[in-house]
Image: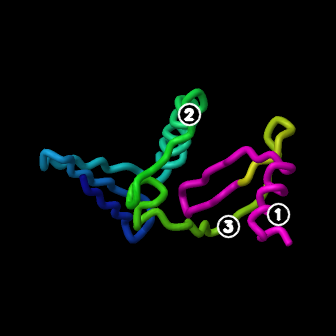
Amino acid sequence: MAWRVDVAADGNLFSLGVRNDAGREYEVLLGTVDSTPILSDLLSEMARVHRSLPPRTFAEGAGPRHPKSLPLQPLSTHIQQHDGVPVLVLDFGGTVLKVRIDPDELQRSLAASGAGA
């Protein structure tokens, strides 16, 4: 399977093209304004399903070990409050991901990685 992503020069449209193992190709064309709720739904559903499953392991070159699985650099990052819970807001220029965070867990993780020193 292969995929490609194209974003219009004005940033208003993006397309996702996918070719499956059988060689069939599919393309979805979306407005950037649609990308935030679509990605939020996708990631929320994945977390909901995987919450009750054992942790996944990935073969070399798959999932987070895939060569294209690189750290993302948002255009801006800040913290908001949502229902009294801190939320990390990552703006990718039209797509804005809001991720609930546990400040204590984040601090422990940063300390364990050496990044919080």
Looking at this view, name the residue that lies furthest to the left. 23
Query: Where, by quadrant of the figure, is residue 110 drawn?
Result: bottom right
User: Could you tell me which residue is drawn at 32 percent across and 50 percent down?
Assistant: 29
Number of other residues with Cα within 10 Å of mark 3, as a class: few under 14, some 14 to 19, many 20 or more: few
Question: Label 2, on which residue?
Answer: 54
The local secondary structure at tag 1 comes to helix
State which tag comes first along the sequence, 1 or 3. 3
Residue 110 in magenta stretch: yes
Looking at the image, residue 53 lies above or below residue 5: above
The local secondary structure at tag 3 comes to strand
Residue 111 or residue 39, whichever sits in front: 111
Amino acid under disc 2: Pro
Say if mark 2 contacts mark 3, CB within 8 Å: no
Q: Which residues are magenta?
A: 89-117
In screen coordinates, is 81 left or right of 92?
Answer: right
Looking at the image, residue 7 lies above or below residue 98: below
**Colour pattern:** rainbow
In screen coordinates, is 23 left or right of 70?
Answer: left
State which tag comes first along the sequence, 2 or 3. 2
Residue 93 in magenta stretch: yes
Say if mark 2 contacts mark 1, CB within 8 Å: no
Q: Is residue 55 visible?
A: yes
Query: Where, by quadrant of the figure, is residue 82 drawn?
Result: top right
Amino acid under disc 3: Ser
Label for residue 86?
none
User: Could you tell me which residue is drawn at 38 percent across and 61 percent down?
Assistant: 61
Question: Label 3, on which residue?
Answer: 76
Looking at the image, residue 41 lies above or below residue 36: above
